[in-house]
Structure formats: structure tokens, C-alpha cells
Amino acid sequence: MNGSTFAAIILASSMACLVTSMGIYIIRKYEKWGIDNIAYFMSFAAGVLISVSFIHIIPKSFDMNRSSPIFLLVGFFCLYLINRFLNAYVCQTPERANYTFGLVPMLGIGFHSFLDGVIYSVAFNVSAFTGLLAALGMVLHEFPEGIVTFLLLERSGFSEKRSTLYALLAAAFTTPLGALVSYPFISRVNIITLGALLAISAGALVYVGTSHLLPAVENEQKKYTIISLSSGIIVAIFIVFAK
């Protein structure tokens, strides 16, 4: 186990966790402002998540695993089935009716953030330079990811305290957890398996963006969400092609 490589992985994943936590803290401190502008955060996050999935994660997974289209479909429909399950069994009482609105994106973002930690392990094991490029790209989307996770949970009916806790667990702490769990075994994870995991992650993110974030943005009927959506797409393009 290379000590310097392990230290770099922990530093990068901890930085991602810190940036996400900062987003959650800031949006909690300025909650009214956040609620008034949630549509812009959601549209920005949708632009980032959907674009990164289509222009980077999906093509990359296809290169790594010929069966990735199947796993992409699995990721998408797993989130759909989880959504249906939560609606049918968890959120059937009136006081819980909207919980699924926050829980499903939280699960998708949590799985993606865990895989971010795995990707840090893979990238830094390739080379320090590759790891730094990967870290730079992924950390850029952590801040809005934390904000959106918190706001969606709170808006779906969870208390401020629970929204903060769940957002931290799903969006922030899962990244260093993914790095810690994967690092001892990363040499045994073949490229085919990683490609399958990336495809599942992409399917989950596409579902979150298209089935939760964008419809919610439309319901808000804010004038300039197209600008924030476009900004998210531009940021995603920058993240991908700046690597």
C-alpha cells in the first residue's frame, strides 16, 4: 500500500466532502434565499448531472464494458422502482406523501458520490497527475450537489435537522467512504466491473435529472431557469474537456 498515493486519495476525497458540506451549511444559513432560488439550483444541477452523464460517464463506461448499455438501463430503472416502492409503501400517509421527492434524488446522488470516491482511488493509482485532473473535475460539481440535496429533502417534508444529516450522509461523507472502502481492493477491480458501476451510476443520475429535477423546475415557473440550466451544461462541458 503506497502511503503517498493513499494520502492523496484521502485528501482529494476529503476536499470533495468539505466542498459539499460548505454548500449544505451555506444554504441552511441562508434558507429563505435558498428556497426562493431553488429552481435555479435544481436546473443548474440538472444541467451538470445530465450533461456529465451523457458526454463523459456513459461513453467512458461503454469503452470499459461492452455490456454497459444494459447496466445503464438497470441504473435508470432501479431508481424508478425505488421511487415506486417509496411512493407505495413509505409515502402513503399524508404527512409522508412528498418524501419520495427528496429521497430518490438523495439515493442517486449518494450512489454517485460513493463512486466518486472509487474513481479517486482508480485515478490516483494510475498516476498522481491523472488523479489531480479527476479531482479538479469532480470537486467542481460538489457544491451545488450539496445544496440541491438539502433543499430537495427539506422541501419534501423532512425537518431542517434531518435534511442536513441526510444530505451530509448522502452527498458528502459517501465520497471519502467510497475511497476508503475501495482503496485496499482497487488493484482487484477490473476495468469491466468499473465500467458496469459507472453505467449504473449514469443511469441513476439521468433518472434524477430528468424525472425529478427538471419537472420540479418546470413547476416553479421561474423566468431565467433556462440560463441556469445552460450554465450547468457549460460547466459540465468545461469539467469534461478540461481534463
Image (cartoon, rainbow, N blue to C red):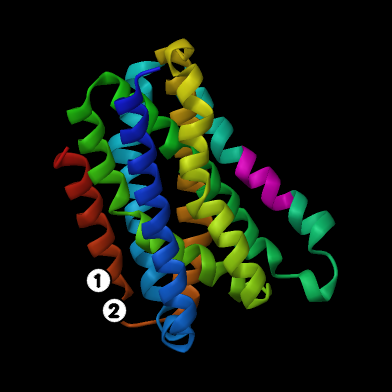
Q: Position of residue 6 (x, y in %)?
A: 37, 28
- For label 1, the residue is 227
**Residue occupying image coordinates x 49% and y 33%:** 180
| Residue 8, image quadrant | top left
**In the image, what residue type sits under mark 2?**
Tyr
What span is in magenta?
A: 78-84
Which quarter of the figure is the N terminus placed in? top left
Residue at image x 31%, y 26%? 5
Q: Residue at x 31, y 21 (%)?
A: 125
Quadrant in the picture for the C terminus: top left
Q: Residue furthest bottom?
A: 32
Instruction: Please name whichever residue, 203 or 112, is drawn nearer the observer in this view of the structure.
Output: 112
Disc 1, SS: helix
User: Quick check: 29 left or right of 154?
Assistant: left
Residue 71 in view (yes/no): yes
For disc 2, the marked residue is 224
Q: Position of residue 38 (x, y in %)?
A: 44, 76
- 81 in the magenta segment: yes
**Magenta highlight on residue 116:** no
Secondary structure beneath dot 2 equals loop
Instruction: Identify which amino acid the numbered label 1 is placed on.
Output: Ile
Would you call the spot at circle 2 few (<14 residues within 10 Å), some (14-19), or many (20 or more)? few
Residue 234 to residue 1: above or below: below
Q: Residues within 10 Å of mark 1 (few under 14, many from 20)?
A: few
Specify whether 5 is left or right of 148.
left
Depicted 113 relative to depicted 129: above or below? below
Cβ atoms at labels 2 and 1 below 8 Å apart: yes
